[in-house]
Amino acid sequence: MSSHENFTTPSRFILVGFPEAHKFHFLIFAVLLFLYIFTLMINFLIILTVKSEPRLNTPMYFFLMHLACLEACYMSVTIPKLLENLILKPTVISFLGCAMQMFFFLFFGVAECFLLAAMALDRYVAICHPLRYMIIMSRRVCWTMVIGSYTCGTVVGLVHTSVTFRLPFCGVVINHFFCEVQPLLELVCGDTFLNEVQVIGVAILAIMVPFLLIILSYSGILFAIVGMSSIESRYKAFSTCSSHLIVVTLFYGTACSMYLKPKSIYFPPVDKLLSFSYTIATPLLNPIIYSLKNKAIQEALRRFCQRMTLV
C-alpha cells in the first residue's frame, strides 16, 4: 500500500490561537480590536492625505502611501481571524481559506520587506545626493521599485503556498493563530527536510537581501550625517534614521527568527509571540514612526481634516 493512501486532503483546519491566555481573551480582543481600527484609520488617512495634497507629490511620500496601503492589507489578513479565534471555539478555517491566508500574508509581508528597502534607498539618495535626487528618483524609477516589491511578494507567496498545500497532511490542528508556513509543516506526513530548506532559502532572499540593502543605505546616511556642519541638522537626521532602524530591526529580526530555522526547533508559545510582533506591533508602529512624526504629513493631515470638517 502506498504511504499516500493513509491520508486525505483535509477540508478544513482548526486554529489553536492562544490557549495559554484564555483568561484574558476578552481583554485581548478589546485591545486588539481598538488597535486594529485605529491603525486602519491612520493608514487610510495617510493615503487620502498624500493623494489629496499636491505638496506631497514627491518620491518619499509616494513610498509612504504604498507602505500605508500595504500595512492596512497586511494586518487585515490575520487580525480578523485572530479576533474570531479569541471569541469562538474552535476557530475553523477551510482548506482554501487557509491557502489564501498564507498567500496574501506572504505577498504583503515580502512586498513590505522590499518596499522598506526601496524607502531606505530613497532616503540615502535624498541625503547623500540631494542635487541629483529628483533625477535619480524619477517617477519611472519609483514605480519600478513599487511594482518590483509587489512582484517579489507574488512570487514568494505563490511558491510557498503551492508547494505547501500539495503536501500530504496527517493532522488538521494548527498550533498557531493563522496559517503560517512553519506550523503547517508540523502537520505534514513524512520527511519535510527539502521543504524546510526551501523556506529558509526563500527567506534569505526575501528577508535578508532587503535587510542588507537597508543596512547599507543607512550606513551611507550615517557617514553623511557625521560630515554635517550643523549640529541641529545632524541631530534631526540621526533621530529620523534611528527610529526607522528600530522599527526595521524589529520587523526583520522577528521575521528572521521565525523563518530562518528548521522545523525541529519550532516552539509554539515563543514563535506565536514572534509572529504576533511582526503581524501586529510593526504595522502599528510603522505609520507612527514613518509618517505621523513627519512635519509635512502632520500639516497636510491638519489641512485635510479642516477641509473635511468644512464640507
Image: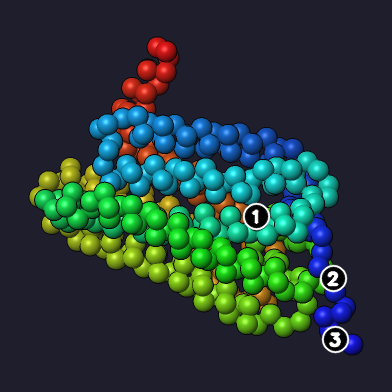
Q: Amino acid at mark 3?
A: Ser
Check disc 1 and report its element: helix, strand or loop.
helix
Q: Amino acid at mark 1?
A: Gln
* Label of residue 132 in the image: none
Q: Nearer the viewer, residue 9 or 289?
A: 9
Q: Is residue 120 above or below residue 30?
A: below
Q: Which residue is mark 2?
A: 8
- Residue 199 image point, x, y percent: 57, 73
Q: Which residue is mark 1?
A: 101
Quarter where residue 52 is shown: top left
Whether residue 170 is visible to the viewer of this picture, yes or no, is yes
Quarter where residue 195 is shown: bottom right
Check disc 2 and report its element: helix, strand or loop.
loop
- Residue 152 image point, x, y percent: 46, 63
Distance of mark 1 from mark 3, alpha carbons? 31 Å
Q: Amino acid at mark 2?
A: Thr
Quarter where residue 98 is shown: bottom right
Q: Which residue is mark 3?
A: 2
For marks 1 and 3 on the same chain, the one whose residue lies earlier in the sequence:
3
* Residue at left offset 42%, top offset 13%: 311
Whether residue 242 is visible to the viewer of this picture, yes or no, is no
* Residue at left offset 47%, top offset 43%: 69
Q: Is residue 68 above or below residue 211?
A: above
- Residue 232 image point, x, y percent: 18, 42
Distance of mark 1 from mark 2, alpha carbons? 21 Å
Q: Is residue 207 above or below residue 241?
A: below
**Rendered-image quadrant of the N terminus:** bottom right
For marks 1 and 2 on the same chain, the one whose residue lies earlier in the sequence:
2
